[in-house]
Amino acid sequence: MKAVQVTGYGGIDKLDVVSKPAPEPGEKDVLVRVKACAINNTEIWMREGAYGTGSESGWRPEGVQFPRIPGSDITGEVTAVGSGADKSLVGKNVVLFPFTSSGEDGTEHIAEDMAFIGSEYDGGYAEYVVWPADLCYDMPLDSYIESAVFTVSGLTAWHMAAQTAVRPGEKVLVTGANGGVGSLNVQIASRVFGADVIAVVGDMGLEDRIKELGADAVVSYKSPNLAEDILAAAGGPVDTVLDVVGDALFSISLQALKKGGKYCISGSSGGQKTELDFRQVYLKHITLYGSVLGTREEFGQLLKAVSEGKVKPVIDRTFPLDQAGEAQTYFQQSGKMGKVVLLPEEGTTT
């Protein structure tokens, strides 16, 4: 099969297109012919070594074992099963839950042995991938490409809203609202949890599209009066901040929160380290949440919402697999709207 491997920590020069044998499914595994794999910050930060220091990176402290095939947002067709897996799965179109864990229901994502596809296991930047049969779900939509954009971003966004207990009528600030997680934060917070969303973007030319996703108001982080703009759009301080930007908007996010408000971060594309004045937290009784991924129950809830049309795919563009480096470079550029998707098979259009 054709695959893209990360050969070590570094830039896109560490991505190699290779030909190698397709993997063999274990007893309780399935072999999936990959039809689409959306890009996330996770595989870029894994390649760059951003999750750890020195030689440590990846989702687990021991670091990544190279070479590794990245990619975690995967859809495809089951083509073979292991001896202990259900034979009726052959031919099914599936989306892959992105990690393994021994954690009990509701705590899978915080178990010490949580291991991520594309970091601890070979992932979807390939024509085939092996994965446990019980972690393969029916695709929520008919399209491979559209169904591939929800896994990591969607599960993270859903968990952010659930973890902060967003309620109908609350004011929720969403940063990075045109990105993969942010565009889903807008939809999930507004269309599923019933909140009023104030979305932060860079390009106000995206305002109409962001409002189509469910935002009540859109503001630009380029404004010299961003905090005032947020308060004006919300009619006062907001109840919750769902942040994927980090340092660049951290202080303003805390300023915009009401007393007793909740701040949840799931990414840090605008800077992974910040300065915190603890007085901003304790004098306003702010609760801070760290959040990434979620539970299998939440994944099922997400896929149901997608199949019901409450949450829709937002896709910027697609790339063929052998242009993975170009795709990751493009992914990191500002001004995109939604997800970037790799296509292992030439001619895949749905």
Image (cartoon, rainbow, N blue to C red):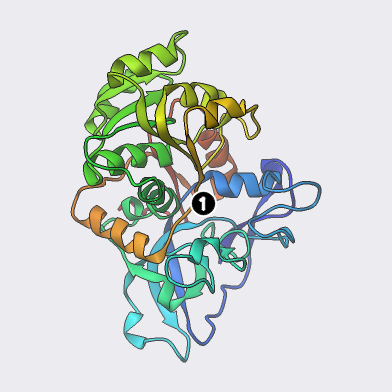
Q: Is residue 127 visible?
A: no
Image location (x, y in percent) of residue 25: 52, 80
Q: Is residue 195 visible?
A: yes
Q: Is residue 227 left or right of residue 323?
A: left
Q: Quadrant of residue 176?
A: top left
Image location (x, y in percent) of residue 130: 51, 73
**What is the residue that sits farthest to the bottom in this orientation?**
83
Q: Residue at x 47, y 33 (%)?
A: 285
Image location (x, y in percent) of residue 278: 60, 29
Q: Quadrant of residue 186?
A: top left
Q: Residue at x 52, y 34 (%)?
A: 330
Q: Is residue 308 left or right of residue 111?
A: left
Location of the N terminus by quadrant is bottom right
Q: Is residue 121 left or right of residue 293?
A: right
Q: Quadrant of residue 85?
A: bottom left
Going by the numbered disc 1, the residue's amino acid type is: Leu
Image location (x, y in percent) of residue 106: 43, 65
**What is the residue that sits farthest to the right in this orientation?**
54
The correct choice, above or below, for 171 with respect to 126 in the image is above
How many marks do you count on the picture? 1
What is the secondary structure assignment of the residue under circle 1?
Answer: helix
Q: Label 1: few (<14), some or many (≥20) within 10 Å?
A: many
The correct choice, above or below, for 214 with respect to 49 in the image is above
Viewer-proximal residue among 279 and 324: 279
**What is the residue that sits farthest to the front in this orientation?**
283
Q: Residue at x 24, y 54 (%)?
A: 305
The correct choice, above or below, for 81 with respect to 224 in the image is below
Viewer-proximal residue among 88 and 240: 240
From the image, tell me which residue sits under label 1: 321
